[in-house]
Image (tube, helix red, strand yellow):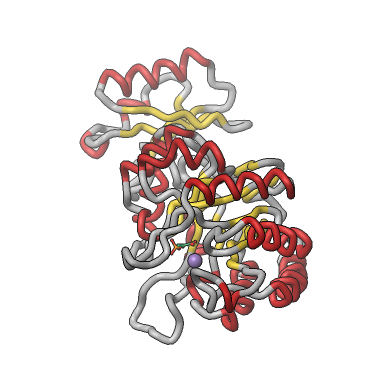
Amino acid sequence: MIVEMRKGVTAEEIDVVKQRAKSLGLGVQLNLGTDKVVIAILGGNTGQIATDIFAVLPGVESVSRIMKPYKLASREFRSQDSIVSVGGVEVGGRKVVVMAGPCAVESEGQMIESARIVKEAGAVILRGGAYKPRTSPFAFQGLQKAGLELLAKVRDQFKMPVVTEVVDTHDVQLVSKYADILQVGARNMQNFTLLSEIGMKGCPVVLKRGFSATIAEWLTAADYLLAEGNHQVILCERGIRTFETTARFSLDITAIPVIKKSSHLPVIVDPSHAAGHFALVPAIARAAIAAGADGLLIEVHPNPKEALVDGLQSLSPSDFTRLMKELRQVAESVGRSI
Ligand code: PEP
Ligand code: MN
């Protein structure tokens, strides 16, 4: 249930609504907008409680039910776009943010070279996986703690925030010590204990869409982060599984305007995992920006032929530099910049 308060509402009036909700065993979350206060009433049985219970209280303008399963991620809860700030970079504003780097952290030399290439081309956040959620237990699992240390070293050298995946609840503390943004991978989108743990940490998160998740399930997963008070959530569309087999996944371009309509959270696109092949990445990346994405997460490797993970879908330095030039033009044509 969403309670919209009147303009100029007093702190006492807000408190009365909070107390009423609490007396009914319900939770509350406040959104203190610049000119409006919105209160989300949360809890299992809100469907059985009459909206009038809140509508009659002083200072209340309107009360509406959210029939959608997600609440805190919804536009109804917060009408303005949310902006996630990380190390001086804003995700969700006018600027399109490009995050780029290799799939996996392999060595210091590879990370230094990657950072140099992507920064020079205009990327503002460096990616690199230290913990890799591999489909097979026999595949390279990442350098783990040593990978985190390398990431932090390169971050400091190049003054670029880093995004890296956390795959296990037990690693949240360690990964958040090194990374600026924690990535929740597609395979973990509904790992609710992991989401709650990251929610409690409060650090910026990239929440990838599970490849068989609906948009509603994805936004409801985002609610797990938001419910813990972590508002630094960036959604990432990375392709879903369909009957089509010519690409690794099918990028759901429709998800971008749907998210913009249904949620206040910024949404970025990972064209690399959707494509599965470097030759398909540029077209998908251009389309994502044209469709309104707030950023991109792109795999780039100094030498894709030598990559330990996802070499086929990684862009070479020259391909990435060329793509960035094209992306700037697309961004400008839709009133944004890179
Ligand atoms: C990744 O970004 O390296 C990754 C494993 O992505 P996804 O979770 O989308 O498969
Ligand atoms: Mn990858």
Relative height, residue 159 to residue 110 (above, below): above
For residue 100, what is the image quadrant?
bottom right
Q: Position of residue 320 (x, y in %)?
A: 69, 72
Which residue is nearer to you in this view: 6 or 187? 187
Q: Position of residue 316 (x, y in %)?
A: 66, 75
Which residue is nearer to you in this view: 42 or 16? 42
Residue shown at the point (44%, 19%) measured from the top left: 58
| Left or right: where 105 falls relative to 225 | right
Relative height, residue 310 to residue 186 (above, below): below
Relative height, residue 90 to residue 249 (above, below): above
Q: Position of residue 260 (x, y in %)?
A: 53, 57
Residue shown at the point (60%, 66%) measured from the top left: 298
Q: Which quadrant of the figure contains the C terminus?
A: bottom right
For residue 187, what is the image quadrant?
bottom left
Residue at the far top in the pictured view: 12
Relative height, residue 192 to residue 11 (above, below): below
Which residue is nearer to you in this view: 48 or 321? 321
Q: Position of residue 42 (x, y in %)?
A: 33, 34
Residue shown at the point (49%, 69%) measured from the top left: 309
| Left or right: where 168 falls relative to 11 | left
Q: Which quadrant of the figure contains the N terminus?
A: top left
Instruction: Answer whether residue 337 is visible to the viewer in this image.
Output: no
Instruction: Answer whether residue 241 is visible to the viewer in this image.
Output: yes
The tally of labels here is: 0
